[in-house]
């Protein structure tokens, strides 16, 4: 996975959710974003979906897709890359 | 965005040992405001279910500024924000009718689930269309202003 995209997504997560005292290097590429990991919740997912559509034009319609996509920054990056090249 | 208004009167069983309304009742009053507004547009819980959705509350805030007391006439003011994401965000104000004093304010967020429990990340078109008359109503100039 491109390091550049992974870093970009980490910055997007931090910026969109206004995470204080969290830096890109604090987020593990394969670490969980929700629950025990970064601790994001369902409202955070909704905010991220809006930002991802705005920046990358990708659509995550519901939690069924979201649970797979938001598993980690790496799974998110893979999804963004696949959806972008599919267009 | 204007607020929809409904009135209630503080009942004896709503006050605590200090003769002030117990804090939890303000949340019930928010619910009165919300149901009054949604009933006007046939958007009560049963209507959501008919469309194939439920809308559970995931976040609730209340700021208490002044106490309400037994027999006070209360104005419950309710509005809903235009959605920027797949959530319904209501705002509330609780005022004492006699002097218009703001007693409490609050905000409540509901997300949307399908009946089989999938959370929607995009506001569905059919619901957007059902919500539009509600937003049009709240966009109208406030007659009390």
Image: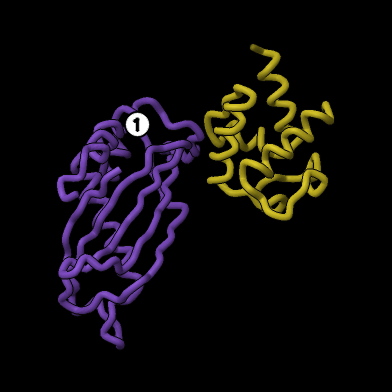
Chain colours: A yellow, B purple
Q: Residue at x 40, y 55 (%)?
A: B107
Q: Position of residue A29 (x, y in %)?
A: 80, 39
Q: Residue at x 22, y 37 (%)?
A: B140
Nearer to me, B94 or A66: B94
- Residue at image mark 1: B127
Q: Position of residue B103 (x, y in %)?
A: 30, 69
Q: Residue furthest front?
A: B145
A81 shown above or below B123: above
User: Which chain letter goes with mark 1?
Assistant: B
A23 shown above or below B42: below
B69 shown above or below A73: below
Mark 1: secondary structure: helix
Nearer to me, A66 or A21: A21
Q: Residue furthest top?
A: A87
Question: Which quarter of the figure has residue B100?
Answer: bottom left
Q: Residue furthest bottom?
A: B17
Question: Which quarter of the figure has residue B77?
Answer: bottom left
Question: Which quarter of the figure has residue A13?
Answer: top right
Q: Position of residue A9 (x, y in %)?
A: 72, 34
Q: Is the residue marked by circle 1 packed among few (<14), some (14-19), or many (20+) residues within 10 Å?
A: few
Left or right of B120 in this view: A66 = right
B143 shown above or below A56: below
Q: How many marks?
A: 1
Q: Quadrant of the C terminus of chain A?
A: top right
Q: Residue at x 64, y 24 (%)?
A: A56
Nearer to me, A23 or B58: A23
């Amino acid at each position: 996975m491109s390091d550049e995209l992974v870093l970009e997504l980490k910055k997007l997560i931090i910026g969109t959710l206004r995470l204080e005292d969290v830096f890109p290097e604090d987020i593990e590429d394969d670490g969980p974003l929700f629950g025990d990991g970064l601790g994001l919740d369902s409202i955070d997912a909704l905010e991220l979906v809006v930002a991802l559509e705005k920046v990358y034009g990708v659509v995550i319609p519901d939690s069924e897709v979201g649970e797979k996509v938001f598993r980690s920054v790496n799974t998110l990056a893979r999804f963004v890359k696949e959806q972008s090249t599919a267009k | 965005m204007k607020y929809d208004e409904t009135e209630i009167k503080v009942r004896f069983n709503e006050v605590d040992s200090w003769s002030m309304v117990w804090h939890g009742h303000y949340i019930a009053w928010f619910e009165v405001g919300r149901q009054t507004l949604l009933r006007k547009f046939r958007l009560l819980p049963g209507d959501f279910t008919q469309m194939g959705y439920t809308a559970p509350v995931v976040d609730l805030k209340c700021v208490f500024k002044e106490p309400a007391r037994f027999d006070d006439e209360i104005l419950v003011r309710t509005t809903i924000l235009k959605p920027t994401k797949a959530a319904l965000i209501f705002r509330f104000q609780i005022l004492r009718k006699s002097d218009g004093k703001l007693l409490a304010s609050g905000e409540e967020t509901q997300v949307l689930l399908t009946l089989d429990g999938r959370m929607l990340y995009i506001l569905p078109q059919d619901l957007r269309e059902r919500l539009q008359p509600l937003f049009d109503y709240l966009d109208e100039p406030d007659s009390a202003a």
